[in-house]
Image (cartoon, rainbow, N blue to C red):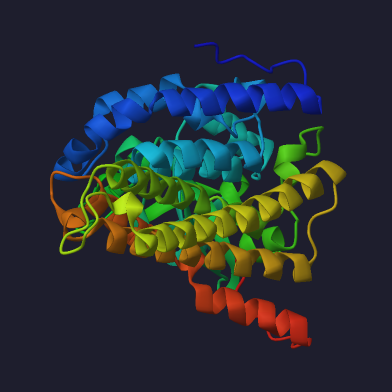
Amino acid sequence: MNSNIGQEETGAPFREEIRAELVGRAIALQPLLRDQAARGESERVLPAEVVDALTEAGVFRLLTPRRYGGYETDLRTLTEVSEALGEGDGSAAWVGMIISVTNWLACLFPDKAQEEVFGADPDARVTGVAAPAGMGERVPGGWRVSGRWSYNSGAPHATWAAVGALLKDDNGAVTDQALVLIPASDLDVEDTWHTAGMKATASNTLTGRDVFVPEHRVLSVPAAAEGVYPRASRDETLYGSTFGPMLLLCLVGPLLGLGKAAMNVVVEAAAAKPLSFTVHSRQADSVGVQLQTAEAALKLETARLHTYRAVDEVDRAASSGAPLDYAARAHVRARAGFAAQQVLEAIGTLLNVHGASSFADAGPLQRVWRDANVAARHAGLVPAVGLEVYGKSLLGVSERVSLML
């Protein structure tokens, strides 16, 4: 496949052509992803065939700069690709999304860091953990960082990691919260990801002790949250995208795909599956089934409407060069969590329709249900936090409860 599509032209019609091409590739991967999903679960890591296919389809280059051979698309493209992949397998969609968006994150660092990551390896794969689970101490030329970073999705496939750390001055006082870029080879991976769902994401724990991180591989999170990035200024609108919304909304795409996968299974089965202990030889003939299916479809539609409206706001703000203000960011945070909950409710209703056979090991619905419920519990999608942040914003309460906005 041509990884150089869109290298020269950047107008809106051409961007839409690139998006259609990349989404089409993701859709074409669905049979492979479905076929390998059970194996990925069993081995607790994406099969090599899946990783190779994602690479060949350009998924890991979605948000990599064109100057390094990437597509440099936008959040809309990432979300549509993630949704399409999620119809095939939630774990594959999640890993593809995480690596893509963390590659974007690496491009907010100074150019020297970007060159180190992508200059010699256009297919570089950055994974990350934003929680400040590490500690950095000032040393000549940079920082000495130690920590344990859990839930690092895609850990086995990473070439670099962006991990959170609290930075201390010479007196031991914390002066900043940062993300630091570290080669994956400088970190160890502990096998800690033993979960009910999203098993193949291999979201294991990274550990590092006294790792030297030069100054140019440090990004201040409070500054980034307010749109201040240390990268050089150039005509690359993607990397002007607002920090928090970019890192939150991307999480919803795989969930939208999982919801669609559940709907497809249930609707197809309803045409022939009887409704036990009733007169209906087909579930599709039951008014109760019809009502529940319609309700689930509307919940999925609600999730998509909230998600894509917010996604388009983020992309428009990046194109205009004006990051979203606090009120808009609070609104995005709430919509992301709300959309995730709508997907979970829809899937729950669809399992009620399909019945006890939903939980057969041989069928996909039980995995969809487990994957969605694990993914939706990501800290960035906790609905209560999003509602609190948005409610405070609506009511003029100035207290800030999260940097991830």
Residue displayed at 59% across by 31% down: 64
Image position, residue 169 (x, y; %): 57, 71
Left or right? Give the position of 28 relative to 395.
left
Residue displayed at 80% across by 65% down: 325
Query: In which quadrant will I find the C terminus?
Result: bottom right
Is 156 or 372 nearer to us in this picture?
A: 372
Q: How many labels sit on residues? A: 0
Image position, residue 313 (x, y; %): 75, 52
Is 381 or 70 nearer to us in this picture?
A: 381
Residue displayed at 13% across by 44% down: 362
Image position, residue 241 (x, y; %): 72, 48
Where is 83 relative to 369, above or below?
above
Where is 91 relative to 209, above or below?
above
Q: Residue furthest front?
A: 279
Q: Is residue 274 visible?
A: yes
Q: Is residue 198 visible?
A: no
Residue displayed at 85% across by 52% down: 322
Where is 143 relative to 50, above or below?
below
Left or right? Give the position of 190 relative to 160.
left
Left or right? Give the position of 155 relative to 135.
left
Is 170 or 10 nearer to us in this picture?
A: 10
Image position, residue 112 (x, y; %): 64, 35
